[in-house]
Amino acid sequence: MRAVAPRTLGLAEAALGGGLALGQWLRRHPHAARALVVGTAYDLCARGPAGLGLGLAIGAARPALRGPIVAGLALSARRRLGWFAGHALAATAALSAVRAVLPGPRTDRRAVVVVNAHAGSTRLTRRALTHLHRLDSNVGVIVAPRDAFGASLSAAARQSPEVLIVAGGDGSISGGAEVAADHEVVLGILPTGTGNDTARGLRIPLGPEDAASVAIGGVETAIDLGLAGTRLFVHAVSVGVIARFAEAVQHLRGRARPLLYPLAAWRVWRHYDGVRLEVSVDGQPVHFPGTLVELAVVNTPRLGGRLGISLPPSLAADGRLTAIAVTRSPLSLLVRSLASMMQQRPHHPHGTLLTRDARVITLTSATPTLVAIDGEPIAETPIDLRTLPARLRVHVPAQPRRWRGAASDHRTPGDDEAARRQQR
């Protein structure tokens, strides 16, 4: 019997392992499998760009990669991703066998999903719900209109689920967090909005299938909540240009909404003259050099949505809030200040930015000024802000993906809080 060369055997094992891994990934992302088949068929029949099928599949599962993928496929390289394009159909042909070998984890947790029908993407919500039902058949779904969303959350919590899952944007997640904290239920997050700062700050994946897996079967951890007057918040309270921007886009709906965001932001910034605030941090007054255009009080370590920044100091379980003040300045100086703040814990001013960590922050003004709470322009000054340590239990990823700007790439907020308790 002829012996098989070690190199050939190694290549065969690598190909088998890669095929099984690809099959398992495609099983978790059926929409990506369909995109792979369609793109590869077009590639073979119409001589489209090499690697189109794989590019469509990755773009379908990871929307953030669509831009780089489209740019890469537009290049003139003839053999771009040629090996993957040539073997894409063979990989999808083995998908049914892989499903039998790798059935995937299922859960039996009692969960209720509350969907804000007038917030977030219906397409992303539909994909997330489909994946949830594949993972757990014991999932109830409530689709609520905007005016009945709060009542639907309370009704869902009264069913005593193990997990209360909320699908929507930051405002919807904020309402779900308040109900989950009051009823001592674990919160699961399906980020289907535009900014999704809360999910980004907690390192929850934005892909609907991955987010659904975390929402129903993630690691439970306790995070802080903020209290703005009488209303709880998860992410941030903002006064200034961000609050005005939230007011300008609150009525935008449909798929064109993300495209209209930059235009709305430019219009608000261009015509905004600044805000006059009196700020005290833990009882001490704070003075700002120059004209104040934005004051954000952040609980979860993210600010600015898709184009935003990660904030190392404002960990979601450190028992403190982080106040970030932005004064009017040239754009180049603002960019340098943001880059400096992302690199270190900012105890001192960074050009046009001034940051402070505190437990209680008070905002007052001579005339009532608009305040946005978790992206919703619903309050006015004067207002008191304080932190409520470890007030909410939430599901986060077991192995967080790399987090740009974070102090640690492999720790959850609960891990950081546990480490501090051991040190004390």
Image (cartoon, rainbow, N blue to C red):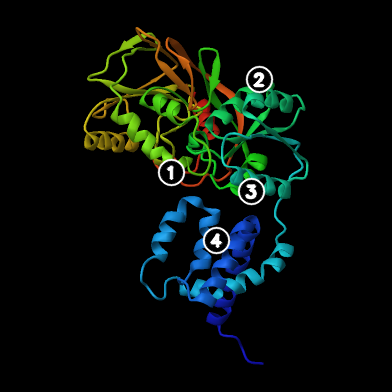
Mark 1 touches mark 4? (CB < 8 Å): no
Q: Which residue is mark 4?
A: 57
The answer to which of marks 3 and 4 sits earlier in the sequence is 4
Residue 315 visible to an observer of this rendering: yes
Which mark's residue is nearer the viewer, 2 or 1?
1
**Alpha carbons under labels 1 and 3: distance apart:** 22 Å
What residue do we see at 70% from left, 26% from top? Answer: 152
The answer to which of marks 1 and 4 sits earlier in the sequence is 4
Mark 3 touches mark 2? (CB < 8 Å): no
Which mark's residue is nearer the viewer, 3 or 2?
3
Residue 379, image x and y in percent? 48, 16
Q: Which residue is mark 1?
A: 259
What residue do we see at 36% from left, 9% from top? Answer: 365
The residue nearer to you, when weighing 118 against 295, is 118
The answer to which of marks 1 and 3 sits earlier in the sequence is 3
Q: Is residue 37 left or right of residue 68?
A: right
Identify whether 126 is placed above or below 159. Answer: below
Q: Amino acid at mark 4?
A: Ala
